[in-house]
Image (tube, grey):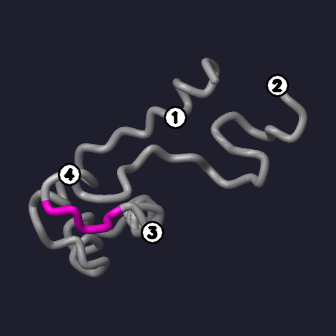
Amino acid sequence: MEEGQGKRGRNHTGDQKMLIPVRCFSCNKIVGGAYEEFVERRENGEDPAKVMDDLGIKRYCCRKIYVSHLDLIDELLPYD
């Protein structure tokens, strides 16, 4: 492991890396900025549908990005 890398899946600043799209593929709305809050609130036991409504993710095309996203960064980092 490189010096300064820290835990696997984290960059040199300690922030977790994610591969969420910045914009919706269909309507071009910015959706990447709210993903971290969505994951945090979902892990705390809130209903994902209500969290997306609170964050302003109301269109089906945008919601499918959040629902279908898999965090694969941990599997990809060894090949960096």
The question of residue 28 being in magenta is answered with yes
Q: Which quarter of the picture shows residue 5? A: top right
Front position among marks 3 and 1: 1
Q: In which quarter of the image is the N terminus?
A: top right
Please say whether residue 13 is one of the residues in the magenta stretch. Answer: no
Labels 3 & 1 near each other (Cβ < 8 A): no
Q: In front: 66, or 40?
A: 66
| Residue range of the region highlighted in magenta in the rendering | 27-31
State yes or no: discs 2 and 3 in contact (Cβ < 8 Å). no
Residue 14 drawn at (x, y percent): 74, 52
Q: Which residue is drawn at 40% across and 69% down?
A: 34
C-alpha gap between disc 4 and disc 2: 35 Å
Closer to the N terminus: mark 2 or mark 3? 2
At horizontal 78% and vertical 47% (from top left) the residue drawn is: 12
**Can you give x and y, in whole percent of width and height, for residue 73 in the image?**
52, 34
Q: In this view, does 1 lie above or below 69?
A: above
Element at label 1: helix
> What secondary structure is found at the residue carrying circle 2?
loop
Distance in Å between CA atoms under marks 1 and 2: 16 Å
Distance in Å between CA atoms under marks 4 and 1: 20 Å
- Pair 3/4: label in front: 4
Q: Which amino acid does label 1 sit on?
A: Ile
Which residue does the numbered mark 2 point to in the structure image? 1
Residue 73: assigned label: 1
Mark before the other along the chain sequence, 4 or 2? 2
Residue carrying label 4: 25
